[in-house]
Image (cartoon, helix red, strand yellow):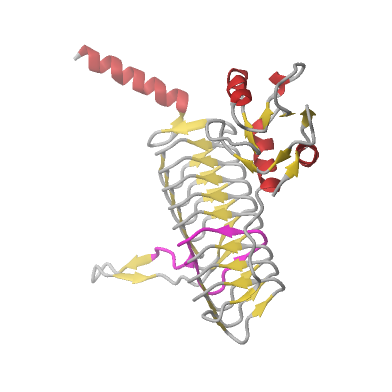
Amino acid sequence: MARRLAEIAEFVHARLVGDGSVAVTGIASVQSAAPGDLVFVESESKLDSALQSRASAVVAGSFAVGKTYSKPLLISDQPRLVFARAAHLICQKPARNPGVHPSAVVHDSAKLGSDVTVDERAVISEGVQIGGGTWIGAGSVIGAGVSIGENCDLYPNVTVYPGARLANRVIVHAGAVLGSDGFGYVRDPKTGRYEKFPQVGRLEIEDDVEIGANATIDRGALVVTRIGRGTKIDNLVHVGHNVQIGTDVVIAAQTGLSGSAVIEDNVVIGGQVGIADHVRIEDGAILGAQCGVPSRKIIRGKGIVFWGTPARPIRAYLKELAILARLAKKE
């Protein structure tokens, strides 16, 4: 959708330098830009490349203030953030035709809000409630008693187990499984056999959460698994039963969270991190890739990066590596 640059500047609250009537029709990297595209740079050293590209306009940092340029600019202290917000305005969602595809199966007791789209071969079970503007992708299965809020996007082949609750504007990518049984068993010492511990809790996902492809989130055993507002979960992440995740948490791919872990607000978790049961990660901590956190450990330190197994502050981790390197040289 074509947007005037002045309209974009107003929408993203950026300073406009140059011709605001320029039409922007897409976004791109500097290397792949074509006429009509908007690009961004975060450093002054890359600004010349952006200006020499085929892009029609550039988002740049405050380093670009006070000069004249060959292309119009949007200037902000946060150019990447402004670019992301501009993309929401320029790149509209693909148009969908609300309604239920003839091959979909929708139970008579299900309640669908206005402008809901249910694609081919999807199954909507008994007692399901779906809010207005939500899309259920092809082949998805929505279990009995599930509640899905407004303007959610469930991509193809998503499975939502019975009783789960999804709030508004939740995005769930293809193949994700929400609300499955947790991995809970009790061993009989006499026979050595394992018996399943009851998994009768529920799963609650708050507003503006995004869940990546093939991620799996277990419901609570006896209570609730909760994913807080604005949290972003990458592909192939597993969240165990009873886990509590706060608001605006970011979890990268292939991370595993064991049962009853607590992740407080604004935590950042890198790829392939392993978090054991009953761990608490306190507000704002950052776990680097492939960290390991043992059972019942508490990680605290807002803005502090932790690394290694067991996870410790990165300064301590690097110091240990340096000592080991010196010892190896002595041998």
Seen from the viewer's position, the closer of residues 177 and 78 is: 78
The relative height of residue 37 versus residue 128 in the rendered view (above or below) is above
Give the residue furthest to the top: 330
Residue 131: name its quadrant. Answer: bottom right
Kindly identify the residue that appears in the image at 40 percent across and 63 percent down. Answer: 183
Question: Picture coordinates of residue 325 (x, y %)?
Answer: 29, 18
Kindly identify the residue that appears in the image at 70 percent across and 26 percent down. Answer: 71
Numbered range of the magenta stretch:
157-184
Q: In which quadrant is the C terminus drawn?
A: top left
Question: Picture coordinates of residue 193 (x, y %)?
Answer: 26, 70
Q: Is residue 188 magenta?
A: no
Left or right, 146 with respect to 315, comes to: right
- What is the magenta segment's predominant secondary structure? loop
Seen from the viewer's position, the closer of residues 190 and 24 is: 24
Question: Picture coordinates of residue 142 (x, y %)?
Answer: 53, 73
The relative height of residue 93 versus residue 253 in the rendered view (above or below) is below
Seen from the viewer's position, the closer of residues 248 and 257 is: 248
Left or right, 304 with respect to 4, comes to: left
Left or right, 24 with respect to 211, comes to: right
Give the residue furthest to the left: 331
Seen from the viewer's position, the closer of residues 141 and 85 is: 85
The relative height of residue 141 versus residue 298 in the rendered view (above or below) is below
Kindly identify the residue that appears in the image at 65 percent across and 49 percent down. Answer: 91
Q: How many marks?
A: 0
Give the residue furthest to the bottom: 108
Residue 14: name its quadrant. Answer: top right
Q: Is residue 174 magenta?
A: yes
Left or right, 78 with respect to 174, comes to: right
The relative height of residue 64 versus residue 245 in the rendered view (above or below) is above
